[in-house]
Every structure is written in C-alpha cells, then in structure tokens.
Image (tube, helix red, strand yellow):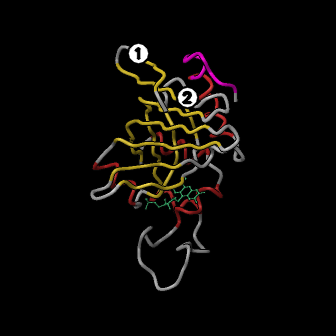
Amino acid sequence: MKRYQDLDELLNQIWAMVEQGSQDPDHPFHAPTFGTVSAHTPNLRTVILREVDLQQRLLLFHSDRRAQKISDIQSHSRVTWHFWDSNYNAQLRLMGKAELHFDDAIADAVWQRSYPNSLKVYLKPIAPHTEVEQPQSGLSDKAQVEEGRKHFAVIQTRIDEIDFLHLHKDGHYRAHFQWQETGVSSAWIIP
Ligand SMILES: Cc1cc2nc3c(=O)[nH]c(=O)nc-3n(C[C@H](O)[C@H](O)[C@H](O)COP(=O)(O)O)c2cc1C
C-alpha cells in the first residue's frame, strides 16, 4: 500500500478495504476484532464482517442474542472494531455506536439473505457461555435452520471515528477522522 499524503484519498482507501473485507472471505479484514465495554473489563472477540454500507458508514455482523456482547451493548452502546492487515502493515480502528436488531425488518432481511450454513450456529438450544461437562458446540443435529431465528441478532455499528496507522518503510504515519453533525474532520497524528 502506498504512503498516503492526502487524507481524503486515504479515507477512500480505508472504506474500500473495509468493504472488500466484508465481501472477500480471504481478505484480512473479513474477521476483525469487535470490542465492547462490559461491567468490569473490555471484551474483545473475533467476528465475521458481513456487510458494509458506505453511505451510512454502517458495519454489520450477526450473533446469538443470548451472547455476552448483546448485554454489553445494551449497557454501553459505544463499540470499537479492530482490523490488522499484515500484508500492508496497516492497523485500523473504527469506533461508533452499536444498534441491536432482533425481531425487526433489518434482522429479517439479513436472515433471509444469509447462507444457511452461517445460520446453523443459532440453533443451539443451550445458551452461549453456559457451562457444560464436555467440550461441545451445543448444536442439535435434528433442528432445522429456521428454528434458530429466535436466537438471531444483527449488530449494526454506525462509525463516527477512525484511527488508522500505517507502518511504512519510509516512515510510519497515522491519521484520525471524526464525524460530527457538521461533517468529517481529519488530521495526521503522531503514531
Ligand atoms: C473466525 C471466527 C469468526 C467468528 N465470527 C463470529 C460472528 O460473526 N458472530 C459472533 O457472534 N461470534 C463469532 N465468533 C465467536 C466469537 O469470537 C465469540 O467467541 C462468541 O461470539 C462469544 O462472544 P461473547 O461471549 O463475547 O458474546 C467467531 C469466532 C471466530 C474464531
């Protein structure tokens, strides 16, 4: 990746990489880290970036509505996405406010357009995080995918801040972008 000198051009490149991450399972941005605030500690986990809406700066993934991250978001809606591309030596952090969708049109639409294989995990009759005696997935063989709809949640984040760091052989550099009512402000900052 080239060493960017223009903030607007860099921002376009960042969004292009994020969008590509949502579309290409082999892209390093396909499985980022999603961070929430819980009562006692930050909570980080890998998720699959499913969809990106560039116009609205929305990132979307899905989850089980009984998961810890859901209650974290219900208490603290500010979240952070972390991406690392080892080919480009670039780190990206996207901050924003998360919204939960359970039984609404957004969750229905994502459920409908998802591959059944990616929905099987929501069949688990036992809630995530429940203690069991043996290592097991908690999946029931007999259940139909449709039965998992009641556990399915869509988590959408509206991004309002970006921190980008590029470790470049000609000099590391870092950029910060922030959206307010009046628009986006951008700056180079010291890495
Ligand atoms: C490669 C990979 C992809 C994952 N994708 C998702 C995902 O899209 N949604 C999700 O809820 N959990 C996903 N997980 C599982 C989470 O990392 C995490 O273990 C689980 O959601 C429980 O997190 P929580 O207890 O903090 O809610 C993924 C794990 C891995 C290793």
Please report whichever mark, 1 or 2, sits nearer to the chain's N-terminal start.
Answer: 2
In which quadrant of the rendered image does the N terminus lie? top right
Q: Secondary structure at mark 2?
A: strand
Q: Magenta stretch: residue 7 in it? A: yes
Query: Looking at the picture, how far across and down is residue 107, in whole percent?
Result: 48, 45
In the visual, does 2 lie left or right of 46?
A: right
Q: Quadrant of residue 137?
A: bottom right
Please name the residue that numbered disc 2 is placed on.
Answer: 173
Q: Quadrant of residue 54?
A: top right
State the residue at coordinates (65%, 58%). Answer: 117
Query: Looking at the picture, how far across and down is residue 140, in whole percent?
Result: 56, 74
Q: Magenta stretch: residue 8 in it? A: yes
Are there few (<14), some (14-19), or many (20+) residues within 10 Å of tag 2?
A: some
Q: Secondary structure at mark 1?
A: strand
Q: Label 1 vs label 2: CA separation?
A: 23 Å
Judge by depth and name the residue closer to the eye, 10 or 179.
10
The amino acid at mark 1 is Gly
Query: Looking at the picture, how far across and down is residue 147, in whole percent?
Result: 52, 63
| Above/below status of 39 relative to 158 | below
- Residue at the limit of the structure toward the bottom, as seen here: 133
In the visual, does 39 lie left or right of 132?
A: left
In the visual, does 44 lie left or right of 121?
A: left
Please name the residue that numbered disc 1 is placed on.
Answer: 183
The amino acid at mark 2 is Tyr
Mark 1 Cβ and ligand 1 under 8 Å apart? no
Residue stretch rendered in magenta on the structure: 2-10
